[in-house]
Amino acid sequence: MSVRRLGVLSGALIGVVLLVGVVQAGAAGSVTVLKFHNPPGVSTGIGFNLNDPNAIPPLGSSIAIRARLENVGSQFGKPSGATVGRVLLQCTVLTDYSATGTIDGICNGIAHVPNGFLTFDGNGGFSNASVNFYAVTGGVGPYANDRGSIKVVNHKDGSSDATVTLSS
């Protein structure tokens, strides 16, 4: 008899777990996509001279980057091309170039837009790649519970295009 109760209890428990999974999947919010063009930003070396082409950023130094966010398409009630915000990115050097021969680290950023802001992380500031990716870690306003990714396509003139894909 106790085996039968255990079987019924296990079946009920599995049913509840499956139901919770279905409810959570159904409750998964909508996807929001934001697109921006970023004209060349301003970069500042902290702890080294960024303007010296031979300078190697030492362990613990950082690069601060500031750029404008311009609409690609109509967003936030403003037309394509309108400046709608700014992005601030600080990248901290976490590798010793003399030991590794590379510079790498973590970049933390914030993107201010008219209805709130997003926070994000990645290492794109140290990469010369044509495409960089960042993880959206949260924000304020309608972005408070969002997660997602940012794909940044870099251009030779120092500008870039960013596609932000969010889900809540």
Image: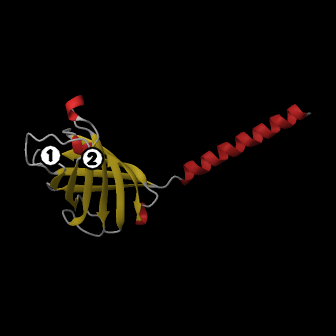
**How many marks do you count on the picture?**
2
| Residue 136 visible in the current orientation | yes
Label disc, if present, on residue 92 of the rendered structure: 2
**Residue 75 in which image quadrant:** bottom left
Q: Residue at x 20, y 58 (%)?
A: 66
Mark 2–mark 1 distance (CA, rounded to whole Å): 23 Å
User: Around disc 1, counting alpha carbons within 10 Å, would you say few (fewer than 14), some (14 to 19), or many (20 or more)?
Assistant: some
**In the image: residue 44, left or right of residue 146:** left
Query: Residue 147 versus residue 30: which sits nearer the camera?
Result: 147
Q: Which residue is at 25% across, 58% downward?
A: 87
The secondary element bearing badge 1 is classed as loop
| Residue 163 locus on image (x, y percent) | 29, 51
Residue that protrudes farthest toward the right in the picture: 1
| Residue lying at 61% horizontally and 45% vertically, measured from the top left | 21
Q: Position of residue 111 (x, y in %)?
A: 30, 59
What kind of residue is marked 2? Thr
Colouring convention used in this rendered image of the protein: secondary structure
Residue 38 drawn above or below residue 103: below
**Residue 85 placement, left or right of 8:** left
Image quarter for residue 123? top left
Q: Specify whether residue 101 is in view.
A: no
Residue at 31% over, 68% down: 114
Judge the density around disc 2: few (<14), some (14-19), many (≥20) Cα neighbours within 10 Å: many
Per the image, the residue denoted by label 1 is 155
Give the number of the mark in front: 2 or 1: 2
Q: Amino acid at mark 1?
A: His
Q: Which mark is residue 82?
A: none
- Looking at the image, tell me whether mark 2 or mark 1 is earlier in sequence order: 2
* Mark 2 residue element: strand
* Quadrant in the picture for the N terminus: top right
